[in-house]
Amino acid sequence: MTFVRVRLALDRLPPGAILEVLLKGEEPRRNVPRTAAEQGHQVLSQAELPGGLMRLVLRRKG
């Protein structure tokens, strides 16, 4: 479900735009970066944050 929200946010952006996402939970932290890359988006960075969060920065394909 988390990736659906991320994908909707990416779809609203122009090609090449940057999206920063905060993820919590093991499944989204594992699946969102992988699925985004599989769909052609670029994973610019991933950083672990306090409290079990991960900061993910994506560039929309195109």
Image (spheres, helix red, strand yellow):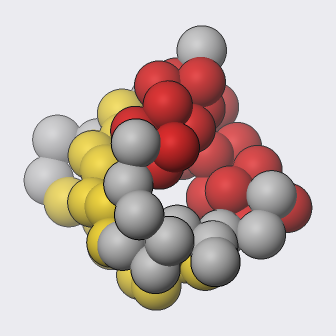
Outermost residue toward the bottom? 44
At a point 40% along the width and 42% down the height, the residue shown is 12
Outermost residue toward the front? 14
The quarter in which the C terminus is drawn is bottom right
At a point 50% along the width and 71% down the height, the residue shown is 15
At a point 47% along the width and 48% down the height, the residue shown is 10
Outermost residue toward the top? 1
The quarter in which the N terminus is drawn is top right
Q: How many numbered tags mark residues here?
A: 0
Residue 51 placement, left or right of 61? left
Asked if 33 appears above or below 43 in the picture, the reply is above
Outermost residue toward the right? 38
Asked if 10 appears above or below 4 in the picture, the reply is below
Residue 39 placement, left or right of 59? right
At a point 27% along the width and 60% down the height, the residue shown is 20
Question: x%, y% of residue 11?
Answer: 52, 43
Residue in front for this viewpoint, 16 or 30: 16
Question: x%, y% of residue 17?
Answer: 36, 73
Asked if 10 appears above or below 27 in the picture, the reply is below
Residue in front for this viewpoint, 51 or 6: 6
Residue 20 placement, left or right of 32? left
Residue 21 visible: yes
Residue in front for this viewpoint, 4 or 45: 4
Asked if 42 appears above or below 20 in the picture, the reply is below
Question: x%, y% of residue 23?
Answer: 36, 40
Residue 30 visible: no
